[in-house]
Image: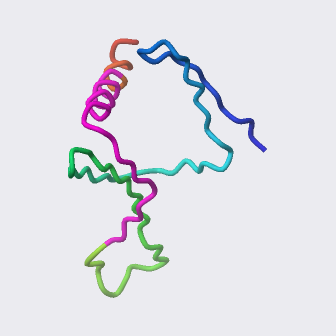
Amino acid sequence: MAKKKTEKSEQKAGIPIEWHVPDTIITRFASNMVIQSFENVFKISFFEIKPEIHLTPPQIPQSTIRADCVASVIVTPDKFSQMVEVLQRQIKKPESDK
C-alpha cells in the first residue's frame, strides 16, 4: 500500500495546514472540463473521454462520444482567482527553467 502523502504550508493566519491525500483517492486523467458559475461560486467539473474500442472500422460513424465526470469541485470566486494565478505560474515555470 502506498504511503499517505502529507505536506505543510502556512495560511495567512499563520496556522500551518497539513495536507493529507488518503490512499483511497484515485488520480484520474481529465481531457475536458466545464466551468459553471452560479450563486456566487464556481463549479468545476472534470471529464475523461474514453473512445470506443474498435478492432475493425465501425460500420456507422460515431455521432457522439461519452465523457465521464471524474471529479467535480465548487470554489469561491476568491479561491478560483488564486487557482488561476497558480496555474498561470505553473504553466510559465518550464519556460523560465530553460
Answer with the quarter of the image where residue 90 lies. top left
> Can you give x and y, in whole percent of width and height, for residue 37 in the image?
21, 49
Q: Residue at x 46, y 76 (%)?
A: 54
Residue in the foreground of this view, choosing between 34 and 76: 76
Q: Residue furthest bottom?
A: 59
As drawn, 67 above or below 97: below
Is any part of residue 48 visible from this angle? Answer: yes
The image shows a total of numbered marks equal to: 0
As drawn, 22 above or below 66: above
Answer with the quarter of the image where residue 3 lies. top right
Left or right of residue 72, residue 43 in this image: left
Answer with the quarter of the image where residue 92 lies. top left
Quadrant that contains the N terminus? top right
Quadrant that contains the C terminus? top left
> Can you give x and y, in whole percent of width and height, for residue 49 in the image?
39, 62
As drawn, 54 above or below 13: below
Q: Is residue 74 in the magenta section?
A: yes
> Can you give x and y, in whole percent of width and height, for residue 85 in the image?
28, 25
> Can you give x and y, in whole percent of width and height, for residue 88 in the image?
29, 26
Q: Is residue 79 in the magenta section?
A: yes
The stretch of residues the image draws in magenta is 65-89
Q: Residue at x 44, y 65 (%)?
A: 50
